[in-house]
Image: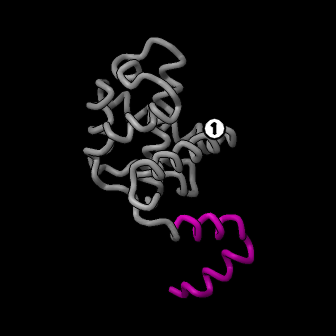
Amino acid sequence: MQYLLLGKLLVMRHPEVAQRLLVQIEHDPPLTDLSRIPELYTVFCELINVDPPTFRGPLFSTNKVDIRRLFVSVILHLYNPQVYSHPSNNIIIPHNGFIKTLSEFFHVNRGYMSRFIRETIVMEKVYEEYRQKVEQIREGIINKTLPNGQS
């Protein structure tokens, strides 16, 4: 395949897509150690000023759902950023233990967590303000937990 020609065509016809792809490529690889999720959750809760145990387990309020959704969005960016760049509305979640780990961490079943992740991805694709909040928290987590603030 003629990748150079494809790249030129993409830049000429869809510069915003080309820019998003370049930014994504420039980032370091995503996190892979799922055992860090509890640590990242603690930092997340510190950043948004909430009590960590309050938002685990069954959900009974909109506030809990919103906080959990925000955390899942941030974690998706750290572990599976490619889910946001898929060109179609088909949402592909890699099967690397991510759903299992999150469902165990939050004490919910895997089916619920899978649906929740899909809803979270849609929220971020649709709402600019939500996307900005996720990015701000993601940067805060990176700065507090990763060496030299690099993901």
Q: Position of residue 81 (x, y in %)?
A: 47, 54
Q: Left or right: 80 with respect to 99?
A: right
Residue at image coords 29%, 26%: 109
Query: The residue under label 1 is which amino acid type?
Result: Tyr
Q: Left or right: 67 with respect to 124?
A: left
Instruction: Specify whether residue 11 is painted magenta.
Output: yes
Quadrant where the image shows the C terminus: bottom left
Residue at image coords 50%, 35%: 47
Instruction: Specify whether residue 2 is painted magenta.
Output: yes
Which one is in front, 28 or 88? Answer: 28
Q: Position of residue 52 (x, y in %)?
A: 39, 25
Q: Position of residue 60 (x, y in %)?
A: 45, 12
By what rule are the colours in the image chosen? one colour
Which one is in front, 41 or 22? Answer: 41
Magenta segment boundaries in residue numbering? 1-24
Residue at image coords 43%, 50%: 92
Residue at image coords 54%, 17%: 62
Q: With respect to residue 31, does 53 lie above or below?
A: above
Q: Left or right: 127 with respect to 122?
A: right
**Label 1, residues with CA under 10 Å away: few <14, some 14-19, many ≥20:** some
Magenta-drawn stretch, dominant element (helix, strand or loop): helix
> So how many labels did they put on this image?
1
SS state under label 1: helix
Which one is in front, 84 or 135? Answer: 135
Residue furthest to the top in view is 60
Q: Left or right: 93 with respect to 65?
A: left
Report which residue position mark 1 lands on: 130
